[in-house]
Amino acid sequence: MQQGINPWASSQTVDVGKLFTEFGIEPMETVIDRLPDVPPFMRRGIVVGHRDYGPIADAVRNRTPFNVMTGFMPSGHPHLGHLMVMKEVVWHVEQGGRGYVAVADREAHAVRGIPWEQCREFGREYLTCLYALGYQGTTYAQSSNDPLKDLAFEAAIKINFSDLSAIYGFTQETSLAHGMSVATQVADILYPQTDCGPAPTVVPVGIDQDPHIRLTRDVAYKLRMFLVEQRDGHVSVRSKNAPDAAIDAVHAAFPGSKRYGGHVDVRGGDLQAIEAAVREIEIDHGGYGFIAPSATYHTFMQGLQGGKMSSSVPESFISFHESEKDLKKKVMGALTGGRMTLEEQKRLGGEPERCSVYLLNLFHMEEDDAELAEICRKCRSGEMMCGTCKKETLERTKAFLKDFRERMDEVEHLVDE
Ligand code: SF4
């Protein structure tokens, strides 16, 4: 299993540096400059890494088509820990991306045993939150999307049990439905490209979801008919499993190309243009022409008691319908980066990077970068004590929730539409 990462575990720590060095996730710094406008979640280091985000940054800058896709497992009520992915999706849609959001009800039912009716209720809540943030795009439940189920079946042909045990630690006791829900997730990620044709697709996820991304990229590659590569100044188009008619079509599409069995050697021409033409030929011959999906990885919003913010630890998360009394109890009782005594705090200052209250502000409650920097400065210098800081954060959170709930009420009808 990848560095002990299990996407279905409720809490875990992940060594981000190790993911960069061992699993090919690149730091955002390698690509962030290509974006015309850097969103807060990247500026503030919440999104820490990516796979192949370059084509997405280019599509944003050049206003060319791309997709943004994610899914939510409706295994409980949504809470603040889910908000980051939603904001990332909405931001990409605002930048011109076509939005796709799946309610992963098959997964919730298969993996967590959530009854279908409850999946529907929780799914509605997730979508209401998303619309409250201004989302516009496609939404669906896995269980009611027939083309998705067909695609999941095709994807499942390319996934075997040794993949599942290597990637997720599946054992002989793991149910077949769990394996099917993996294939369905792979299909979710590839689905936008079957809906509107091949295009770069970004999947904003928490860093624990990387196994799904790696598996999906592998399946996308396996479902391609051709492999297109630059070699010694030529472009080589190799058949992986293309029918003869498709190979003939590739040969005919590039005058001067040479065909050697299942291999067409194209002399001259732009790699990207050849790649695009080959994708079209694939689609004309019943293939998919998938572009391997890209991903961004964000760190987790720390729970109010440390660890990951998780539905299974009620004191750790803030729900969108938290009562004032509970909210106060949770924020005022949160684990901070403060010192043992006031005297020490004044002398040494606090440690905001270890503080769940600071992170609450960093992720969602303080949108103004200058104000956030001021909280950080006052904490580090020992100028501000945790009690004051918590009270101010509580007020910000109350105002945020009040506003968010009003917006949820206004958009609830969109879920039915
Ligand atoms: Fe956290 Fe605020 Fe205390 Fe600093 S002053 S440790 S940010 S609660």
Image (spheres, rainbow, N blue to C red):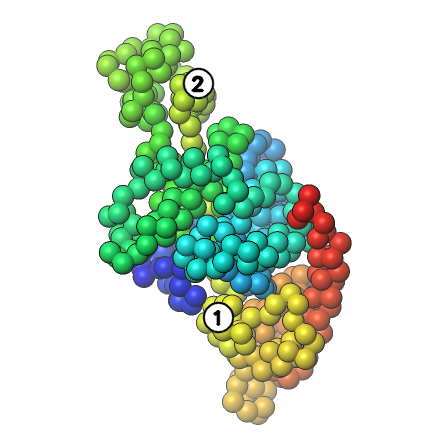
Which residue shows up at 53% across the image and 74% down it?
Answer: 314
Nearer to us in this view, 329 or 390:
329
Q: Which mark is residue 185?
A: none
Give x and y (percent) for residue 359.
56, 69
| Residue type of the residue flagged with mark 1 | Ser
Asked if residue 145 can be seen in this view, the reply is: yes
Tell me residue 262's x, y (percent).
26, 17
On the image, numbered disc 1 is attached to which residue? 312
Per the model, the C-alpha gap separating discs 2 and 1 is 48 Å
Q: Quadrant of the N terminus?
A: bottom left
- Residue 338 location in percent, x, y? 54, 82
| Residue at x 51% of width, y 77% of height | 305
Residue shown at 59% from the left, 44% from the top:
139
> In the image shown, does 205 or 185 lie closer to the viewer?
185
Name the residue nearer the viewer: 392 or 342. Answer: 392
- Identity of the residue drawn at 75% across and 60% down: 406
Q: Is residue 309 left or right of residue 164?
A: right
Give coordinates of residue 208: x percent, y percent: 41, 57
Label drawn at residue 284: 2
Q: Callout 2 environment at 10 Å: few (<14), some (14 to 19), or many (20+)?
A: few
User: Could you tell me the amino acid type at mark 2?
Assistant: Asp
Determine whether the residue tagged by mark 1 lies in a helix, strand or loop. Answer: loop
Q: Is residue 199 visible from the viewing direction of this image?
A: no
Above/below status of 46 relative to 259: below
Question: Which quadrant is the C terminus positioned in?
Answer: top right
